[in-house]
Amino acid sequence: MALGTSKAKARSDALEASLQDAREEVAALQRRKESLQRLLDSRVSLCKMHDQAARKPLEELRVAREELEKRSCICEETCEDLRSRLQQLQEARKHQLDQESLRTVKDALEAFTEGSLMTFADEVQE
């Protein structure tokens, strides 16, 4: 029996040693997993920072583009208002020139009429 007990004891010790090796390997793998997780978290964080850094200029460009579009619309509206005002002024100026032309023709006709009447009166008196 001593031989069976000693074999059992040897097997028990071997199993205990294997169990201890397995525990140590599990602990080592757990440390490796934690290390890899920290590395992954670090890389993810770095990627997020790069992504945000890359998005920032794009966001700034988008905002600048929107601002330029707003300014462009304001400029177009102002330009249209100025065109309309110019057209009104041109029409008013044309009307004014037409009135001045009529006045000039009227004055010329009156002068011609007066001159003709004076000439006729001079001829009648002679």
Image (cartoon, grey):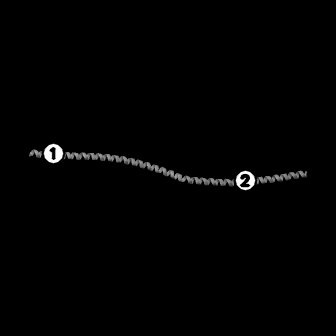
Position of residue 119 in the picture relative to residue 73 (left or right): left
Whole-percent x, y for residue 92 in the image: 31, 46
Name the one closer to the observer, 79 or 12: 79
Tell me the element at label 1: helix
Position of residue 78 in the picture relative to residue 123 (left or right): right
The residue located at (18%, 46%) in the rendering is 112
Q: Quadrant of residue 50?
A: bottom right
Whole-percent x, y for residue 81 in the image: 38, 47
Tell me the element at label 2: helix
Mark 1 crowdedness (10 Å alpha carbons): few <14, some 14-19, many ≥20: few
The residue located at (42%, 49%) in the rendering is 75
Position of residue 44 in the picture relative to residue 95 (left or right): right
Q: Which residue is mark 2?
A: 29
Position of residue 5 in the picture relative to residue 116 (left or right): right
Whole-percent x, y for residue 121 in the image: 12, 45
Count the labels in the image: 2
Whole-percent x, y for residue 86 in the image: 35, 48
Mark 2 crowdedness (10 Å alpha carbons): few <14, some 14-19, many ≥20: few
Q: Residue furthest right?
A: 1
Q: Which mark is residue 103?
A: none
Q: Which residue is mark 1?
A: 116
The residue located at (22%, 46%) in the rendering is 105
Alpha-carbon distance for marks 1 and 2?
Answer: 127 Å
| Amino acid type, residue under disc 2 in the picture | Leu
